[in-house]
Image: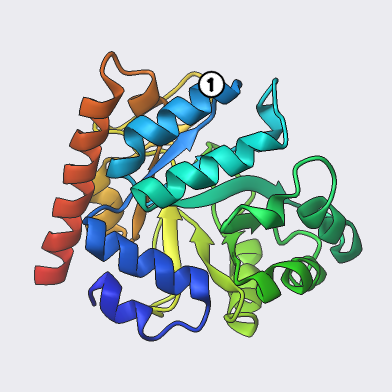
Amino acid sequence: MKYSDRAKLCTNPTAIKLLNLMEQKQTNLAIAADITTSAELLKIADELGPEICILKTHIDIITDFTPELPTKLQTLAQKHNFLFFEDRKFADIGNTVKYQYQDGIYHIAAWADIVNAHTVPGPGIIAGLKEIGLPLGRGLLLLAEMSSAGTLAKDNYTEETLKMAQENSDFVIGFITMRQLLDDPKFINLTPGVQLQAGTDKLGQQYNTPEKVILEQKNDIIIVGRGIYQAADPLAEAKKYRVAGWQAYLKRLKN
């Protein structure tokens, strides 16, 4: 199914917006901006924003964070039509994650369209995040699998995660995963560890190509970090990934 047709099956506002903008912009590329200064993050958002559907952030590694940064980022998101995914990986009990999501110095719920969570604490973590995020129309991704070697996110953990998602499909919009785990068009699958050439890094990160991720493993969004922002020409490299990801999506539709 086309992304835009899948959007019609969703009830979560963020899922609907994301699937529609992917079709409109013809991009399934997410940038993982794992950088440490506000200036770098704003530069990536402005320069690469036209090529992406999602900007994935780690706001807590920004060394010069100020409350004005999210406002500036939101202006760029509106300018270039992309969503924010704060890669917070919540992993505590429901009562604690409520405050981590809404309060503190980052006020993540106020600006991040999407956040994610481990399901190790059980369904209470989803309930806590949902209490804050659902009234704001936000979306949650669950970590069903990870791209690092030796990951424990597999087997029974993955099966239980899928059950929790199905029971909370009004708020859970999809998964961080290496392959399509549920044949349900409402759920969006995002895959990290993507490069134009397959391989691994020295810390155990495993890389797959856009075609393998989208066409073979039937995922929806490729997440690319260092392969783009550490390139000599990040914009040119982002265009390559955008084309590769979109062409794989078109092939999948034909198949």
Query: Left or right: 106 with respect to 230?
Result: right
Q: Position of residue 221 (x, y in %)?
A: 36, 54
Q: Amino acid at mark 1?
A: Ala
Query: What residue lies at 34% left-to-right and 30% top-to-bottom?
Result: 47
Query: Can you see residue 181?
Result: no
- Spot the residue most to the right: 95
Could you tell me which secondary element the residue under label 1 belongs to? helix
Nearer to us in this view, 74 or 236: 74
Q: Which residue is mark 1?
A: 39
Q: Position of residue 217 (x, y in %)?
A: 31, 58
Nearer to us in this view, 80 or 156: 80
- Spot the residue most to the left: 254
Q: Is residue 39 depicted above or below 206 in this figure?
A: above
Query: What residue lies at 51% left-to-right and 75% top-to-bottom?
Result: 13
Query: Left or right: 240 with respect to 35?
Result: left
Query: Left or right: 161 with respect to 191?
Result: right
Name the quarter where the N terminus is drawn. Answer: bottom left
Query: What residue lies at 43% left-to-right and 26% top-to-bottom?
Result: 43
Q: Position of residue 84 (x, y in %)?
A: 52, 50
Query: What residue lies at 30% left-to-right and 24% top-to-bottom?
Result: 234
Q: Position of residue 113 (x, y in %)?
A: 56, 58
Query: Can you see residue 61?
Result: yes
Name the quarter where the C terminus is drawn. Answer: bottom left
Hey, which quadrant is residue 196 in on the image? top left
Q: Residues within 10 Å of mark 1 (few under 14, many from 20)?
A: few
Colour basis: rainbow
Nearer to us in this view, 242 or 68: 68
- Spot the residue most to the top: 232
Q: Is residue 178 depicted above or below 136 in this figure?
A: above
